[in-house]
Amino acid sequence: MLKAVILAAGEGRRCRPLTQTKSKVMLPVGNKPFMEHVILALAANDVKELYIVVGYQKERIMNHFEDGVHYGVEITYIEQKELLGTAHALGMAKPFINEDFLVVNGDNLIDERAVKDLISAEGENVILAVLRSHTGDYGVLTVEQQKVKKITEKPGRACSGILNTGAYRFGPEIFDELFRTPISERGSYELTQTVSQMIEDGKEIRAKIADGVWADAIFSWNLLNANSLALNLMKPKIRGDLEEGARIRGAVEVGEGSVVRSGCYITGPVSVGRNCDIGPNVNILPATAIGDSVRIGSNTELRNSIVMNGTRIGSGTIISDSILGASCTLGDQTITETGTAVVDIEDELYRAEFGAILADNDVVGSRVLMNPGTIVGADSRIGSGTSIRGWIDRASRVI
């Protein structure tokens, strides 16, 4: 029976400010943390002995997944005390592995079909790949007759090609290769460098193009696309209460203890978590995920958005193409506008199209306008009647 190593030690710096309070693997898409989708996909393929390499915010991960029994798997945690790269992280699993095994990133969305593709692929060393147009932030594979000839890491320009998903199947010999990995410019040891060195040494690395679902979120706004894909994978079910006059269309999930009040209209795919209070007269449009214990006031509209656990949204508010972190409070008649914006991430400028991103524990007053591309750090306070845009640092006060 195959084992799997899940790499979950990193922060996901480019997903800040959402990762100021939780690691990227714990960011929710489709109302489940990224890594929960990974674990369920592995379990569905009878890969149930999992070794999870943790580091940043490890307590949140371990408290959520515990020993894995609720997911039908057995989890052993391995701590990477120094974040020295993916090759270093994988090397820490050597004492536990003596046969073929899988390696997957905990911060990617992957479904059971993609895992099945990886397991069934020919060859001892296999990279799971996808065909994509992208912005140059992924490793691109040069493939001839299913054999990988070269990995071009992050070409930095928009292109189409065969992308490395970061999911692999290896034999135990990979551990000998890991300790030959050269150090990168960033001072880390990366698994892609290990594989590139193996290719240069003449070892066979095969690529398997996935038929299943795979998605990553390099930046925080990329979560919206991953969320949409994840919602299309869910099995809709109404466990909560729909008051008379509430209407749903399409694939909609409503969790236990939640109440959708009269006059609400929900068009799927939409997921509403447990113990929520929605409405009355709330309109929830497709690709929206609402976490547990969320309260949404009357005459509010949400579309293509993520609302995390414990957030409160006032009446007459419009939230579109946005992400609201956990335990936020938004006053009445607040609006997030959607449009194209230029966002500064780690001193590099990126063009993106979204409304607003709020990290955990933000408080926003009434009648606030959030212009396109607004990003607010955790624990901030935004006064009523203000108009905000751009990056607002953690624990800021805007009046």
Image (tube, rainbow, N blue to C red):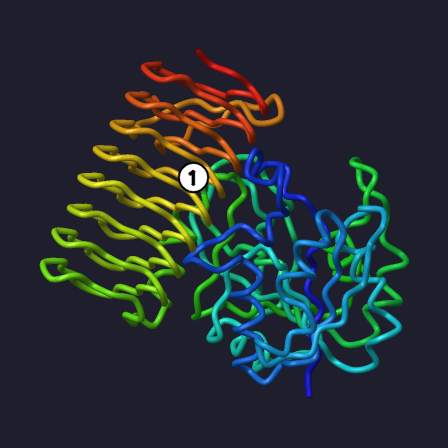
Q: Residues within 10 Å of mark 1 (few under 14, many from 20)?
A: many
Query: Can you give x and y, in whole percent of width and height, for residue 116 in the image?
Result: 52, 78
Query: Can you give x and y, in whole percent of width and height, for residue 129 in the image?
Result: 54, 62
Residue in the foreground of this view, choosing between 149 and 375: 375
Pointer 1 residue: 324
Residue drawn at point x = 62 percent, y = 26 percent:
346
**Residue 271 figure quarter:** bottom left
Query: Can you give x and y, in whole percent of width and height, for residue 132 in the image?
Result: 44, 53
Instruction: Assign the C terminus to one quadrant of the image.
Output: top left
Residue drawn at point x = 25 percent, y = 52 percent:
286
Residue in the foreground of this view, choosing between 345 and 362: 362
Residue drawn at point x = 26 percent, y = 44 percent:
303
Query: Can you give x and y, in whole percent of width and height, for residue 375 in the image?
Result: 47, 27
Indicate the secondary structure of the residue bearing disc 1: strand
Q: Is residue 91 left or right of residue 261?
A: right
Residue in the foreground of this view, choosing between 318 and 108: 318
Q: Is residue 317 left or right of residue 77?
A: left
In this view, the residue farthest toward the bottom is: 1
Q: Compared to 377, does 243 lie above or below?
A: below
Q: How many marks?
A: 1
Residue drawn at point x = 58 percent, y = 61 percent:
35
Q: Compared to 364, does 197 lie above or below?
A: below
- What is the three-letter code of the residue carrying label 1? Leu
Q: Is residue 31 left or right of residue 301?
A: right
Q: Is residue 76 left or right of residue 114?
A: right
Residue in the foreground of this view, choosing between 196 and 393: 393
Instruction: Assign the N terminus to one quadrant of the image.
Output: bottom right
In this view, the residue farthest toward the left is: 245
